[in-house]
Amino acid sequence: MTTFCMMKLLCQATSNENRYATKFFGTLLTQTPQKRVFSPFWMVLPDPRKSTVFGLAQPFCTAEKSHTEPKRKAAFGSVGRRIPYRILHVINQDGESLGNMHRAEALKLMDQHDLKLVLLRENAEPPVYRLMTGQQIHEEQLKRAEKKKTSPNPGMVQKELSFSSAIAKNDLETKTKQIAQWIEKKYRVKVTIRQPKDSNTDMLTLFDQILETVSEKATYLSKPKVTTEGVSTCILRHMSDKELKAYQKMEKQKNSTVKNDENEDLKSSELHQ
């Protein structure tokens, strides 16, 4: 009887154990991969100094390593006394090379002549710095800003058109139509006019005549200027929506004023009759 009871208890314990094990492993298998958590575990790692050593493995992680942002290029201007390099190649305010010198010597020259140090080429060996006046720095900043302004943006199309100031009227009309088509496509148009030696045509007036024909859509990106002797250029661009609205409003006011003046002239003429 006792033996029978013991066997019954053993069978019941085995049945409970199997049920609990099935429930436990079934829960693990039904978990989604996102909800699984792998805790650190101990594993044996080989070590040349010892036969075996225990090390802690890191938990599994799918997070990507953060990438450092690229270093931004500093704006052109005085660096003050913040010079990380020991040896510099220095250029004076007149553009003449003073050779390589220690950072302290360059700062001494800067203080003695009341100038400012500007970094020109950081990738050179050694880096190139220039001593400049505040006015020189300001003028260079304006030049760079103008160059950046007129440089085509990535994806921006810039067309070029070149002709003589002695161009025939029909040919000028053809060129102007071509400019209008490019402006309509929102291209930038660089116009270059060459003036022959025996010509006295005012090229600035010619630029204004071209702009007048496309004034409903275009404006100057870069105003007309003489680049070399006898050669002038300008860059035209399509007006923004805001500029177009302002232009249309101005034209409407202008037409209204002209119409009012005509009506006043007509009334005045009728009174005199």
Image: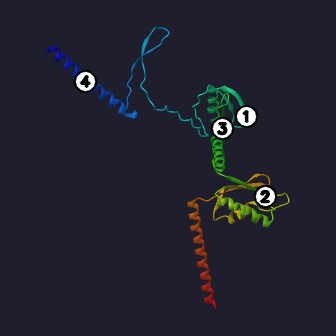
Extreme residue in the bottom direction: 273
Which quadrant would the N terminus be assigned to in this image? Answer: top left
Q: For residue 169, which quarter of the picture?
A: bottom right
- Residue that label 2 marks: 163
Q: Position of residue 252 (x, y in %)?
A: 58, 71
Tell me whether circle 3 and circle 1 mark residues in contact (CB < 8 Å). no
Tell me whether circle 1 and circle 4 mark residues in contact (CB < 8 Å). no
- Of badges 2 and 1, the one in the foreground is 2
- Of badges 2 and 4, the one in the foreground is 4
* Alpha carbon separation for disc pair 3 and 1: 12 Å
Q: Position of residue 45 (x, y in %)?
A: 45, 15
Name the element at disc 3.
strand
At a point 49% along the width and 33% down the height, the residue shown is 66
* Alpha carbon separation for disc pair 1 and 4: 96 Å
Q: Amino acid at mark 3?
A: Met
Which mark is drawn over residue 132? Answer: 3
* Alpha carbon separation for disc pair 2 and 1: 40 Å
Say which of 185 and 273 sits in front. Answer: 185
Which quadrant would the C terminus be assigned to in this image? Answer: bottom right
Left or right: where 22 falls relative to 109: left
Q: Amino acid at mark 4?
A: Ser
Left or right: where 70 falls relative to 26: right
Q: Amino acid at mark 1?
A: Glu
Q: Is residue 99 visible?
A: yes
At a point 78% along the width and 67% down the height, the residue shown is 170
Tell me whether circle 3 and circle 4 mark residues in contact (CB < 8 Å). no
Q: Amino acid at mark 2?
A: Phe
